[in-house]
Image (cartoon, helix red, strand yellow):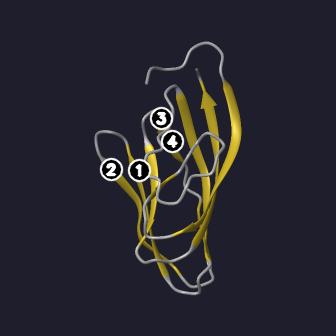
Amino acid sequence: MAYPTGSGSEILRRGAIPAQSTTATNFTFDGSNPTVGSASAVVPALHIITILNIVFCEMAGADELLALTGHNGSGDVRWLNQQSLPARNTFVFSEKIVLIGGDSLEIDLDTAGNVDIWYSYIDQDWT
């Protein structure tokens, strides 16, 4: 992606993935909530997404392991690999992640759990 020039917008957004399970799900960055098991969403062209935080809350009463992976067309990067989420607990991932057009961010669980996810991000739109 080239450096943006001209005018654009910067919007603070949020999304949610209720009842995430073992089917990998991509985060969406258009203001809508992704469907669990949908792994096709990518950052739109001419957008820069800055993830501010992701909150995970285990709802089923069983220990869970989280995997958070970024895909950028030339490789994958795993930010969380078997991150422990104890039963009925919350884990906050507050590291900043920058994604550009074509990148994707995916969440997956090790078991058929039930984890609610809330995420906040900045969407810089240069279209």
Whole-Å distance between the Cαs marked 4 and 3?
Answer: 7 Å
Residue density around tag 1, few if under 14, some if 14–19, many if 20 or more, within 10 Å: some
Mark positioned earlier in the residue sequence (4 or 2): 2
Amino acid, disc 1: Gly
> Residue 54, which numbered label?
none
The residue indicated by pointer 2 is 76
Mark positioned earlier in the residue sequence (1 or 3): 1
Q: Residue at x 56, y 39 (%)?
A: 49
Mark positioned earlier in the residue sequence (4 or 1): 1
Residue density around tag 2, few if under 14, some if 14–19, many if 20 or more, within 10 Å: few
In this view, the residue farthest toward the top is 6
Amino acid, disc 2: Asp
Mark positioned earlier in the residue sequence (2 or 1): 1
Amino acid, disc 4: Val
Find out whether the residues at labels 2 and 1 contact each other: C-beta distance under 8 Å: yes
Secondary structure state at the residue bearing disc 4:
strand
Side (left or right) of 58 relative to 103 = right
Residue density around tag 3, few if under 14, some if 14–19, many if 20 or more, within 10 Å: some
Image height check: is 48 above or below 68? above
Whole-Å distance between the Cαs marked 1 and 3?
Answer: 11 Å
> Residue 70, which numbered label?
1
- 27, 39: nearer the viewer: 39
Find out whether the residues at labels 4 and 1 contact each other: C-beta distance under 8 Å: no
Secondary structure state at the residue bearing disc 1:
strand
